[in-house]
Image: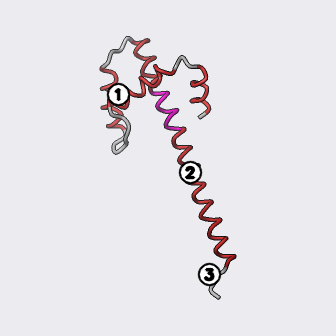
């Protein structure tokens, strides 16, 4: 009998495959948590600088250009995405439960 046809091996393989799937899901969740926290922080930072420094709308376009240059090949730094991050923060900053949830993520 070949080892790969034994029930012990088939169960062993199944356990390892399940562990790989579980690790991949966990890794994806971790990445998503970090990205949500990053987007929240970027939105918050834009809002705070606009208030403190009196910066207008051009800050988003400038940031987009400079972040794309600093992280070539990176995604997510278009002007539209930065505006979305700002709106995300503004929309939910007053919701204390959500702020706590984002921090816990």
* Percent of width and height locating residue 6: 66, 80
* Percent of width and height locating residue 24: 55, 54
Disc nearest the viewer among 1 and 3 = 3
At a point 40% along the width and 15% down the height, the residue shown is 50
Query: Is 58 located above or below residue 18 in the figure?
Result: above
Disc 2 vs disc 3: Cβ atoms closer than 8 Å? Answer: no
Query: Is 71 located above or below residue 15 in the figure?
Result: above
Quadrant placement of the C terminus: top right
Query: Is 86 located above or below residue 3 in the figure?
Result: above
At a point 56% along the width and 49% down the height, the residue shown is 27
Badge 1 or badge 3: first in the primary sequence: 3
Q: Which residue is mark 2?
A: 25
Image disc number at residue 63: 1
Q: At numbered mark 3, what does the secondary structure look like: helix, strand or loop?
A: helix
* Percent of width and height locating residue 38: 49, 33
Give the residues in magenta: 34-42
Q: At numbered mark 2, what does the secondary structure look like: helix, strand or loop?
A: helix
Q: Assess whether residue 37 is covered by the magenta stretch.
A: yes
Q: Which residue is mark 3?
A: 5
């Amino acid at each position: 009998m070949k080892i790969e046809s034994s029930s012990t091996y088939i169960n062993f393989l199944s356990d390892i495959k399940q562990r790989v799937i579980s690790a991949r899901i966990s890794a994806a969740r971790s990445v998503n948590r970090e990205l949500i926290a990053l987007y929240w922080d970027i939105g918050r930072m834009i809002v705070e600088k606009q208030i403190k420094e009196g910066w207008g709308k051009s800050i988003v376009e400038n940031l987009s250009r400079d972040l794309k240059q600093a992280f070539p090949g990176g995604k997510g730094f278009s002007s539209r995405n930065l505006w979305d991050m700002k709106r995300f923060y503004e929309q939910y900053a007053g919701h204390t439960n959500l702020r706590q949830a984002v921090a816990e993520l």
